Amino acid sequence: MPVTVSNCNNSSVNIPFVSVKICAPGSTSNCQTLNNILLDTGSYGLRVYSGMLNSTLLSGLTPVTSGSNTVAECVGFADGTSLWGSVAQADVVLGDLSGSETAANTSIQLIDSQYGNPSVCPGADTDPYVSGFTGILGVGLFTNDCPSCVSSTAPRHYWACSGSSCALTTLSAANQVTNPVANLTTDDQGISLTFLAVNTSTGSAPVTGYMLLGINSRVTGSGFVSNASTGKTLYSANANGDFQARYNGIYYASFIDSGSNGLFFPNNSSIAVCGAGTPADSFLCPSPSTTISPTFTGCTSGQLASSCTGNASTPTFTIYNANSLASTGNSVFSSIAAPINTYFDLGFPFFTGRTVFVGIQGKTSTGLGTGPYWAF
């Protein structure tokens, strides 16, 4: 699948977009292709603004129910935003002009901030223009988005709605919003993302990379034909999807998130922060650049981040003055970073100049084994 990286609404940079075809279950004609869907390895499942779908397709989708009520979801993201809307089953078609694969009867979220009782999901995004995308395709490490919701309402994700009355509900894994890749019949082991390197001091105009479906399921040929993981190192993830980052003697949980537009990490090296009111505001502004070299180590399920013993590496990242990058007018940057308190969020800059594999929990690929894992 081609991935176009640009900005959204001329504000946020490093945004990877894909196109996804959505069909009524079992239909090959009642379908619609949506462009400008954010590709996100930090979440799970397809979420699209219901207002972007035509009425024929909307009426052909199968609502997910809890008893006689329809199911809706309130899902939050690390940047403080949230999405609200009903859950329905669709056939999700992934691919490009050279071929495609269908994740049949896959639960998706229909984003609608006015659905049912919006007050149960305060602050939910209201429309695609505000968000900067028509939807989110979550292709992260897990099959569905709330394992604990099978038996508990504590996460406050899923709601059973009748008109404007909505009450918290549990929901089976099969009915939850589901990572479509996990529902493919052939290439369900995960995905890989590949992007070319970007100049650290100037960035780039919009670029195109690609996402391959499956891991080591098609290893003959080369380039777009092969999804072989040859030469990549496995980093096992724990039950939270994290592996370990060690930086300046301190251990942090770490994850890889194409939906984050920068490298986010604890600034315990006291790298200069761009001033409030400047173009880059709270991003980092060294003069003009600096480097960091955290050590990443794989984690098996159940391990704490500080006690991981898997494969390890110490890559070096260049961080460039974010105000200088903003002044270029470009929209793709490999060296933009910002401080965050407690973890390493390896956002889109991490993907530039490398191929990253995302191994889905419970899915096994020859060579890399059973997910969840990252490999790069």
Image (spheres, rainbow, N blue to C red):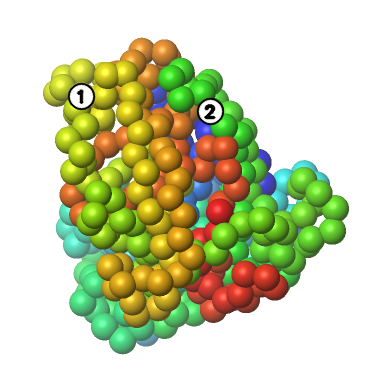
Where is residue 4? Give x, y as percent: 58, 35
Above or below, comparing residue 214 to residue 263 in the picture? below
The quadrant where residue 189 appears: bottom right
At a point 20% along the width and 18% down the height, the residue shown is 278
Instruction: Give the mark, 2 or 1, whose residue is nearer the N terminus.
Output: 2
The quadrant where residue 76 appears: bottom left
Q: Is there any visible trace of residue 21 in the rendered image?
A: no
Report the label total.
2
- Look at the numbered disc 1 and give the secondary structure of its residue: loop
Q: Residue furthest left?
A: 276
Q: CA distance from mark 2 to mark 1?
A: 22 Å
At a point 39% along the width and 23% down the height, the residue shown is 10
Where is residue 165? Give x, y as percent: 22, 69
Give the quarter of the figure containing the C terminus: bottom right
Q: Nearer the viewer, residue 65 or 251?
A: 251
For residue 204, which numbered disc appears in the image?
none
- Look at the numbered disc 2 and give the secondary structure of its residue: loop
Above or below, comparing residue 204 to residue 216 in the picture? above
At a point 44% along the width and 66% down the height, the residue shown is 298
Where is residue 351? Give x, y as percent: 51, 43
Where is residue 228? Give x, y as percent: 72, 59
Disc 2 to disc 1: CB gap under 8 Å? no
Q: Is there any visible trace of residue 208 in the rendered image?
A: yes
Give neighbour class at mark 2: few <14, some 14-19, many 20+ (Cα, 10 Å): some
On the image, numbered disc 2 is attached to which residue? 198
Q: Residue furthest right?
A: 221
Q: In the rendered view, does 329 fall on the left or right side of 226? A: left
On the image, numbered disc 1 is attached to which residue? 274
Above or below, comparing residue 39 to residue 172 in the picture? above
User: Looking at the picture, which amino acid does disc 1 mark?
Assistant: Cys
